[in-house]
Image: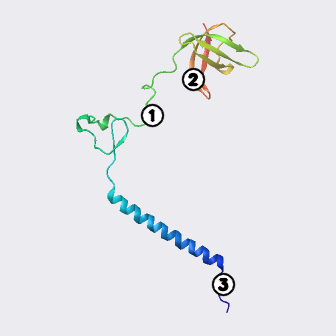
Amino acid sequence: MARAQETFGKKEREKKRLKKREDKKKRKEARKSDEKNDEFIYVDEFGQLTSTPPDPTKKIKKIDAESIVLGIPKKEDQEPEDLIRNGKVSFYDDKKGFGFILDLENQEKYFVHVSGLLDDIAENDKVSFELERGQKGMNAVRVKKQ
């Protein structure tokens, strides 16, 4: 019958494993002893960590749990983004099928694609349009000549 060979490498790996186990046990005991000495840490009204409890006179009023709305607000509650806006075509390339419209209210430029046109447009035309969120920002859609 052959005897199990215990090589130098096997002995070293076993020593490492036992040492790791011992170290882990020591760290666990050290954490337990530290927990007994821990104090409370408080957060003040500015979000800073302090060792003093908060002032009860600055306590925030109670919030009614019924008034908290969870989830996405309904379309009626959201501010309407589909308002019809007025603008001027600052650039439009008929061959490529896209361009930009300058909003007359806030002087912002919005991208417009040929798929969002209701009428044919050209540069310097006055148009009315609606905004819709696209991949890279707000896009002008449902564009009509005025």
Image location (x, y in percent) of residue 35: 35, 58
Looking at the image, which is closer to me, 3 or 70? 3
Q: Disc 2 to disc 1, how far (Cα)?
A: 18 Å
Of labels 3 and 2, earlier in sequence is: 3
Which residue corresponds to the image point at 32% horizontal and 50% vertical from the top-left? 40
Which label number is shown at residue 46? none
Neighbor class of circle 1 (other Cα within 10 Å; few <14, some 14-19, many 20+) is: few
Q: Which residue is mark 3?
A: 5
Residue type marked 3: Gln
Residue drawn at x 53%, y 14% as measured from the top left: 84
Q: Position of residue 33 (x, y in %)?
A: 36, 62
- Relative to 96, is 69 above or below? below
Quick one: label 2 or label 1, which is nearer the N terminus?
A: 1
Kindly identify which residue carries mark 2.
Answer: 132
Q: Secondary structure at mark 2?
A: strand
Question: Which label is found at residue 72?
Answer: 1
Nearest the eye: 12 or 118: 12
Q: Is residue 49 left or right of residue 118?
A: left
Query: Measured along the vertical axis of the image, is residue 59 above or below residue 95?
Result: below
